Image: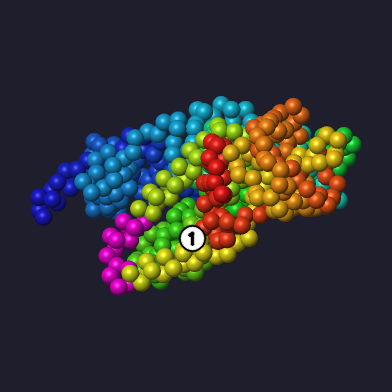
Amino acid sequence: MTQIRRDAERRTPALAPLVTVDEPLGAGGSWIIAHDGTPKARVSGAVATAAARFTGGRTAAEIAAELGSPWTAAEVESIAGRLAAAGLLAETDPGARRPRRAAGRIRFRPPLTVQWSFGDPTALFRILRPVARVVMGAPGAIVGGIVVLAGVVSAISGCADAVAVLERPVPLSVVVALTAAIVLTTVVHELGHGAVLSLFGGSPRRIGAMLFYLAPAFFCDVTDGWRLSRRTQRAAVALAGPAVHLLCAAIAAIAAHVTTASELRVALVLYALSCLAICLLNLLPFVQLDGYLALVAVLDHPYLRRDALHAADVAVARAVFGIRLTADGVTADAPALRERRGLLVCFGVLCRLFPIALVGVVLHRYVTSIAGLGVLPALAYFALLALVVGVAIRTAIRGVRALMARRPTLLRSIIGTLVIAAVGTASLLCPVRASHQGGVLVDGDGDGARLVLTDGQTPPPAGTVVQIESNGVLLSEHLGAATVSAAAPRREEADLSALVPISAAGLTTAAVTVELDRIDADLPRYARARIPDPGVRIVADWLLHTFLLRPLDAFGTEHG
């Protein structure tokens, strides 16, 4: 023990490469210890003062002597020990975490985010700072509020027009323009975050593109905002991006209300709805988007999600497996939340479940949108599916290992496993009334119509009644019903507009068609058919057909 003590006294602590001690941005702000620009710990001024002297040239006793009374060598050694355990010192104990290397331009952030940085944006945001000053001032806020209010009034009065747009196919030119506009608006969204942070004296560290839960997006690293002294400033940085989308949605709603050009009105309505949806999604606090960052800023709880997930894990481990875990995962700077353990557990459960639901929705939208588009989109889908399955398996293995490390009792483990298996099995066996979609193509003379399916898909048997709907981009209006005829199906090139809600004259795709009989409604040139799935009776069948078997149709694989 004496030798260990002597070794500790001779040790000269040094911060790891790329680890910095960042001072607050104004009085009352927080000291931050960061690695490669990413905050790792929020510390007091006293701890920051000691950590700044960890240069590797002085022992703990010498640092304490330099700092003067009331500092002691033991206190300096304690700080060094905590930083070493966090992997922030160059020389750590064998059991401590090793400092990470500098991250490159491409970074993976669990569970399902990949970021690609464009470089240092400091010069760009220095240019944008005057713009942010004007927008964040009182006149800018008043004008913005008036625009949003006018947009709300326009949206309410034009609600019927919006529904009509969503129930109809969209011209290809509108799709191209809408995609470009959304991408540009998302870039401005991220610039808004950085510009507001720069206005308050912070420095955005990175800006770039990312794949966020399988969805392409942009990002701006504003973690330097933790050095801001006021919670309202940190919240303003987080909410600047959603404010951009809300303002753009309002402007588009106003323009759609006054324009007379049909195609332009369609584009403006879709743009307004897209911006509003993006704004609302960003405000949800269950994933690390702007709403979560704003909540963290208001509560002044930097690791809210981590602590909530830990609290949820503790509750589940106790309830299901009888493991008595401690609640040491909750940081000490959030006593109010520690006292409201139930709220923290509920928030943690939602943080666990929401990403799963989000990934499921993205996959479902993707797999339904690629029908009829060929092999390449199907290959991209299966690559994404493999990534999701890989992350899920990795997460499950980690969870089981962490659980077994706590050594639960055998009886409680068996009971807990059986309960989980029973709930999962019951969920998969729930009955469903499922259907899948195909296209309807009305003959040029209007005398007949054909059911259009993707090449490789098996047509329904003769006599099957299909429900016909408008081929809307998001909503569908029920038009009538028809019956599949006994005529033999045939492979041919069919208009792509029969399979996807896009008006694209001249574009065709390989398809299987079959004649329809007993049509009880006047149909437009293109429509959508809802085909019943007699073989899909439970949730497990629906999952198998939706996410695996039907995407295989693109490769010519037939199934019943």
Q: Is residue 136 visible?
A: no
Helix, strand or loop status at disc 1: helix
The majority secondary structure of the magenta stretch comes to: helix
| Nearest the eye: 356 or 414 | 414
**Looking at the picture, how far across and down is residue 19, in whole percent?**
36, 38
Q: Residue at x 72, y 33 (%)?
A: 495
State the residue position of label 1: 348
> In the image, is residue 428 above or below residue 184?
below
Q: Residue at x 57, y 45 (%)?
A: 550
- The answer to whether 110 appears left or right of 233 in the picture is left
Q: Is residue 417 visible?
A: yes
| Nearest the eye: 78 or 94 | 94
| Nearest the eye: 523 or 133 | 523
Quadrant location of the N terminus in the rendered image: bottom left
The range drawn in magenta is 398-413
> In the image, is residue 251 above or below residue 423?
above
**Residue 402 lies in magenta, yes or no?**
yes
Q: Report which quarter residue 175 is drawn in.
A: top right
Q: Residue at x 41, y 60 (%)?
A: 310
> In the image, is residue 176 above or below residue 212?
above
**Looking at the picture, how far across and down is residue 121, in whole percent?**
54, 29
